[in-house]
Image (cartoon, helix red, strand yellow):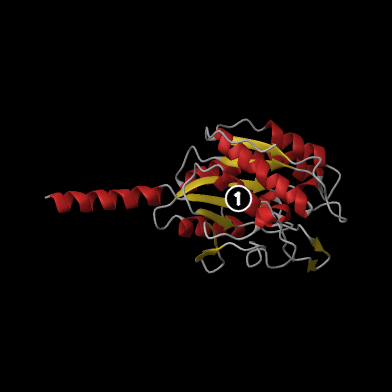
């Protein structure tokens, strides 16, 4: 009887550990997939300390297999552009530094550059791929901790898209929560630092005006951008990753600050 009880406790402990896996979806467009260190079609291969690989940071690759995360973590996902440093790795490093989350931290890259929010609507190729990757990430009982969302630069090109942004984002939040089976799913969106058009403020205002339970907003305005005036620099991505971690950890009630 004692051996049986011990076995049951071991199995329960393993199941509990699996349920506590820290899985984060990274979605949106190029500033989420990462262009830090990219000039033209060339990446400088500089990886700052906050983005270095470590065994307790994994990523789901394009083949739906877990592997140790190495920059650029979107290289086999955002395949039509040159990827560099993004916010995902510094986010993971900062979350781990808190010492209060389950390990390993599992990143699920899904972002694709130059994609307006309408291309992320329910039923589109991008949405279906996100769902496929999320399902694979949680297949062994892991828990989805949050969606990190940085997107909207393309929606600044036309006034029509800019003015529709708020409504489309609210619909996306609702659809993600329903299809992922979590009505309280935490979504941390980034308010734009830049844009491809002249309607940046309309999109930014829409992002900051969204007041939905468990939807947070981290404002990237003022972070350094590269020579293309659209993409964050490597150091800016490191800073953004830390800010996203702050938002996640503080919301989760974990005493952790990065200043």
Front in this rendered view, residue 48 or 215: 48
Instruction: Name the image quarter holding residue 249.
Output: top right
For the image, the number of numbered tags is: 1
Q: Residue at x 70, y 45 (%)?
A: 240
Residue 34 seen anywhere in this rendered image of the structure: yes
Q: Residue at x 57, y 67 (%)?
A: 62
Q: Residues within 10 Å of mark 1 (few under 14, many from 20)?
A: many
Quarter of the picture containing the C terminus is: top right
Q: Please, is residue 256 above or below residue 74 in the view?
A: above
Across and down, in percent, residue 2 comes to: 14, 49
Secondary element type, mark 1: helix
Q: Which residue is mark 1?
A: 93
Viewed as shown, does residue 19 lie left or right of 144?
Answer: left
Query: Among all residues in the image, which is located at the extreme left?
Result: 1
Across and down, in percent, residue 129 comes to: 56, 60
Residue 168 seen anywhere in this rendered image of the structure: no
Q: Residue at x 76, y 51 (%)?
A: 235
Across and down, in percent, residue 188 comes to: 61, 41
Q: Residue at x 66, y 66 (%)?
A: 75
Front in this rendered view, residue 93 or 79: 93
Viewed as shown, does residue 119 lie left or right of 101?
Answer: right
Q: Please, is residue 40 above or below residue 222 in the view?
A: below
């Amino acid at each position: 009887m004692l051996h049986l009880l011990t076995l049951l406790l071991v199995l329960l402990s393993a199941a509990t550990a699996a349920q506590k896996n820290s899985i984060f979806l990274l979605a949106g467009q190029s500033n989420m997939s990462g262009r830090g260190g990219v000039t033209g079609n060339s990446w400088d291969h500089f990886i700052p300390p906050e983005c270095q690989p470590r065994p307790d940071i994994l990523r789901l690759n394009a083949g739906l297999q877990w592997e140790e995360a190495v920059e650029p973590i979107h290289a086999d996902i955002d395949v039509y552009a040159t990827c560099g440093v993004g916010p995902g790795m510094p986010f993971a490093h900062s979350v781990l530094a808190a010492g209060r989350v389950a390990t390993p931290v599992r990143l699920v890259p899904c972002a694709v550059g130059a994609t307006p929010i309408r291309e992320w609507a329910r039923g589109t190729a991008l949405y279906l791929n996100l769902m496929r990757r999320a399902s694979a990430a949680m297949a062994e009982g892991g828990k989805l901790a949050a969606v990190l969302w940085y997107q909207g630069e393309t929606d600044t090109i036309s006034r029509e898209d800019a003015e529709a942004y708020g409504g489309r984002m609210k619909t996306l939040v609702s659809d993600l929560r329903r299809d992922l089976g979590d009505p309280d799913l935490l979504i941390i969106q980034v308010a734009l630092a830049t844009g491809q058009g002249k309607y940046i403020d309309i999109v930014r205002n829409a992002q900051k005006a969204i007041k939905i339970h468990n939807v947070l907003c981290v404002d990237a305005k003022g972070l350094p951008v590269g020579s293309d005036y659209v993409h964050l620099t490597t150091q800016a991505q490191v800073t953004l990753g830390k800010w996203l971690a702050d938002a996640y950890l503080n919301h989760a009630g974990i005493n952790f600050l990065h200043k």
